[in-house]
Image (cartoon, rainbow, N blue to C red):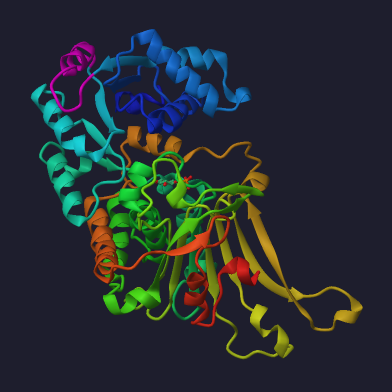
């Protein structure tokens, strides 16, 4: 039997001429094709408003494949095969124009239609309505929703309601691309396949946890979108809270989508609300000013192209998050994410508690604790910092912190780690929802974030400045120092 047969589909990408489709979706589909993970009959149908003909569309996609895929991975034969799967339909998302053509394209095929909405969420409802009017939806159809799903809880509910009129929850795949990252997947294996960690994963053994998602880039021509969102909506509401859920959730009873998602929802429900009283001690928001990245001067947020000079949107946020349950009571989770940081780095650090009784030299006490470092990017891997005796006759019982290292690329000799979108597209075609976000997760996350945003609005304060190329405002360091702790690279 053909191993890809269960995945055969027509993948209709709405917004096929947009940045996400050209930068991520087509390159990922190409890689799946190259790895022979697409069925021979699977077609990729691009839909957008632009007036381009079939060759023009294929040329545009090919150009972007050449831009985003290293030359030595761009096999010519696969490129031809991939291009022969492509079709373009000019379609206006919100009116009925173009849908007939999609119907005609599907007339002779029986396989599943998957609609990928790489468009603003404001047109998700109208697209669904038009698909329905043209009888393009049946029980087999799947729909993929890109973030941001809304701007707050109310708008997110509205969008989810519009889609839910036409699709059941089991047909809806909400993307959070962090869930497709190799190391994020490994979090589940690490926690639940290793008793060493499983038995230590609670308030009795863990002192605190850090999650850092830092980017070097600034706003990169996305000012219009970003300024309405800000870092809390753009990164915390989704990616950071998803990471937090995977670290903090109780073991699911199996690996099914709903078992995992039920556990994540329990974490979201247990998050301590950030009340106005906690806002000053538990949250820091920042906005980058001019500074230096890789030795080159870069402008501040308010001087970026198309910027409004009065904007008080945050490009950085750090938070002290508490989870009110038996596993995590009094264990702080320090979250930090920002643009224009010194490096692109996403990592989770589990700081284990010190020994109950310490017998080594007192001045070394501060280094004597284990840390588990889970590196999402770059250089994906896991490292466990353990204490050993320093080598040498003259060192006595001097302690040294050294890593037990697992670099995925060195250990598994993998040349390339697949992009998150490759995995997500594959799971989507297979019909596995465990890497996609359920509606209640999105809504609990919004509920928690809305309160912070409301608090900021009520206080009517501006974000604190930090120079581009730094780790955020000094108050972010003060937030953790007040608790007698420090961010990892400050103490490393
Ligand atoms: C997106 C955000 O979801 O994630 C962007 O909208 C951000 O602002 C991006 O740059 C970061 O993703 P990654 O995979 O590069 O860490």
Q: Is residue 334 visible?
A: yes
Name the residue at 59% across, 27% down: 70
| Quarter of the C terminus within the rendering | bottom right
Give the answer, above or below, for where 198 lies relative to 101.
Answer: below
Give the answer, above or below, for where 79 lies relative to 276.
Answer: above
Give the answer, above or below, for where 392 lies relative to 355.
Answer: above
| Residue 268 position in % (x across, y down) | 29, 64
| Residue 22 position in % (x across, y down) | 42, 27
| Residue 218 position in % (x across, y down) | 49, 47
Name the residue at 47% across, 28% down: 27
Name the residue at 62% across, 77% down: 369
Residue 97 on the magenta span: yes
Q: Nearer the viewer, residue 77 or 94?
A: 94
Q: Is residue 483 left or right of residue 324?
A: right
Name the residue at 28% across, 34% down: 119
Q: Is residue 257 left or right of residue 492?
A: left
Number of residue marks? 0
Q: Is residue 307 left or right of residue 438?
A: right
| Quarter of the N terminus within the rendering | top left
Q: Is residue 256 visible?
A: no
Q: Nearer the viewer, residue 247 or 260?
A: 247
Report the magenta residues as a range.
Answer: 91-109
Residue 300 on the magenta span: no
């Amino acid at each position: 039997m053909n191993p890809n047969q269960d995945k055969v589909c027509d993948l209709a990408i709405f917004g096929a001429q947009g940045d996400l489709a050209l930068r991520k979706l087509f390159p990922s589909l190409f890689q799946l094709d190259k790895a022979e993970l697409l069925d021979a009959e699977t077609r990729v149908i691009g839909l957008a408003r632009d007036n381009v003909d079939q060759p023009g569309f294929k040329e545009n996609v090919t150009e972007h494949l050449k831009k985003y895929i290293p030359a030595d991975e761009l096999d010519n034969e696969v490129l031809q095969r991939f291009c022969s799967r492509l079709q373009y339909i000019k379609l206006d998302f919100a009116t009925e124009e173009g849908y007939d053509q999609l119907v005609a394209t599907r007339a002779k095929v029986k396989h599943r239609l998957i609609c990928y909405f790489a468009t603003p969420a404001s047109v998700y409802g109208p697209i669904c309505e038009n698909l329905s009017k043209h009888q393009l939806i049946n029980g087999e159809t799947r729909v993929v929703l890109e973030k941001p799903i809304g701007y707050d809880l109310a708008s997110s509910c509205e969008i989810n309601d519009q889609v839910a009129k036409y699709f059941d929850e089991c047909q809806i795949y909400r993307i959070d691309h962090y869930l497709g990252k190799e190391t994020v997947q490994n979090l589940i294996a690490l926690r639940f396949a290793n008793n060493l960690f499983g038995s230590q994963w609670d308030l009795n053994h863990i002192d605190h946890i850090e999650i850092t998602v830092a980017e070097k880039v600034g706003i990169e021509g996305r000012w219009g979108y970003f300024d309405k969102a800000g870092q809390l909506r753009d990164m915390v509401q989704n990616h950071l809270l998803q990471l937090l859920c995977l670290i903090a959730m109780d073991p699911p009873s199996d690996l099914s989508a709903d078992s995992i998602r039920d556990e994540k929802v329990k974490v979201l429900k247990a998050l301590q609300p950030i009340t106005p009283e906690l806002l000053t001690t538990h949250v820091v928001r920042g906005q980058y000013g001019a500074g230096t990245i890789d030795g080159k001067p870069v402008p501040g947020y308010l001087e970026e192209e198309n910027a409004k000079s009065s904007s008080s949107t945050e490009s950085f946020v750090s938070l002290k998050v508490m989870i009110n349950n038996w596993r995590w009571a009094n264990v702080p989770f320090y979250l930090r994410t920002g643009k224009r940081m010194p490096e692109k780095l996403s990592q989770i650090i589990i700081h284990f508690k010190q020994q109950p009784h310490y017998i080594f030299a007192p001045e070394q006490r501060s280094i004597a604790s284990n840390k588990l470092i889970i590196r999402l990017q770059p250089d994906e891997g896991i490292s466990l910092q353990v204490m050993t005796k320093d080598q040498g006759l003259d060192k006595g019982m001097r302690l040294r912190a050294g890593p037990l290292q697992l670099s995925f690329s060195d250990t598994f000799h993998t040349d390339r780690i697949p992009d998150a979108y490759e995995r997500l597209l594959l799971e989507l075609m297979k019909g596995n929802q465990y890497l996609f976000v359920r509606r209640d997760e999105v809504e609990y996350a919004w509920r928690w974030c809305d309160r912070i945003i409301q608090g900021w609005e009520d206080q009517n304060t501006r974000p604190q400045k930090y120079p581009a190329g730094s780790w955020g405002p000094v108050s972010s360091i003060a937030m953790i120092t007040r608790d007698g702790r420090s961010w990892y690279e400050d103490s490393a």
